[in-house]
Image (tube, coloured by chain):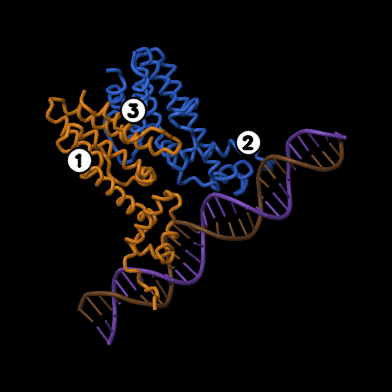
Chain colours: A orange, B blue, C brown, D purple
Amino acid sequence: METKPYHHGDLRHSLIETGIELIGEYGEDKLSLRKVAMKCGVSNAAPYAHFQSKDEFIAAIQQHIMDMFINTLETAIQENLDSPSLLMMLGKAYVMFFYKHPLYYDFLFSRKNIKINLSLGSSGENQPLDILKKAAMQIFGKTNMPESVIQDKVIAMWALVQGLSAIVTMQNVEYTDNWEAKIEDIIKAIAMPC
Amino acid sequence: METKPYHHGDLRHSLIETGIELIGEYGEDKLSLRKVAMKCGVSNAAPYAHFQSKDEFIAAIQQHIMDMFINTLETAIQENLDSPSLLMMLGKAYVMFFYKHPLYYDFLFSRKNIKINLSLGSSGENQPLDILKKAAMQIFGKTNMPESVIQDKVIAMWALVQGLSAIVTMQNVEYTDNWEAKIEDIIKAIAMPC
DNA sequence: GCTACAATCTTATCAGCGTAAAGATTGGAG
DNA sequence: CTCCAATCTTTACGCTGATAAGATTGTAGC
């Protein structure tokens, strides 16, 4: 008789998926727990069986998106493992991810939501900086460059792609040219060993 | 008899000042019109005589902070007009501004608030990118470098300092070293003509 | 100096939000 | 089959941005 069952069945994942949809479409501002719950056909307070607070819900979504991002980077590495332009291709993947999903940039990096470990001295696995480090060692590791110089190069590279991502996702920055090629040029000019 | 006058006298500026205080201290999330109004000794609806909406209020504050930022950059240019390290010093001023005021970074650049023209093809005056361009012409203008190459260099420089600002203001990125010196090194390695 | 108007401010009031408490419903372990 | 724990609903609270109606006041024009 098509009556809605009292138990949703898979509410947690449903909430997260709906949340990601709304964020990708309208941004974090327009994301309210109540709307997400309603979209999932469930009452206001239902989400609180799965998340202690809205912040915890947001953190779960953020983790999900960060996983997608990390995945993109890892794929870029796998596809260019032995190429001399490994670093450049990785940087391009970094920026293009946010170019394709502008709203994800703010969501991942706005102060409020940074709960993910990005620390420089981290023993972290699978974080953006660590992935860049790995690729840099692939490129510069065989040279006799001192480690501290490589470290600086990695941070410069990180800053470059992070900044390009920020710029490329700004609403008022328009550039009629082909961003993808432009990004490639810019990264190439800096990321390649002189 | 110390009775509060019905008319505040300078409410608009009072609201903006109080808003900047709250943002610098707690960030944008904790900023409500009602709290700002109360802090100014005025009722809930009073701000609506000066701003049509909260967004308009936020925009006014953003303009104010952007002016402070631009001012910092202009000062850095004036102080290093004929120095070969002009670009580097300018970049350092760029990053250090946000290092000193981390909460301003999100506030200025979070998608929601970008109403300021940052476009690359802008005829804009006094915008960050234009200031960088001006300084770059000072450095590279006398060489026989093609304009398009200079343009790319400017964007790379912009991305670098924007990214460094983003990184330096991330909560979980800690770096025991002296950031100021580190930033100088990183920018120097890229911003100086080879 | 008086009057009338426009700007400013207050006092409700509304809908939407995050969240907590209390109780209804249900799947599943014993 | 029973009972418990997980899940969901209902209700309610305080805070928020915003609007409408009315009170107060500076000031331009006479």
Task: List the residue tagged with mark 1.
Answer: A77
D8 relative position to A149: left or right: right
> Which is more foreground, mark 2 or mark 1?
1
Per the image, the residue denoted by label 3 is B156
- Image location (x, y in percent) of residue D5: 29, 71
Q: Distance between the residues labelled 2 and 1?
A: 58 Å
Instruction: State which quadrant residue A189 falls in.
Output: top left
Residue under label 2: B10
Residue A49 vertical position relative to residue B193 in the rendered view, above or below:
below
Q: Which of marks 3 and 2 is in front?
A: 3
Separation (CA) of disc 3 from disc 2: 43 Å
Q: Is mark 3 on a helix, strand or loop?
A: helix
Q: Which amino acid does label 1 sit on?
A: Ile
Please state if B78 lies on the left or on the right of A150 as rendered. right
Q: Nearer the viewer, residue A130 or B150?
A: B150
Chain containing the residue with disc 2 = B
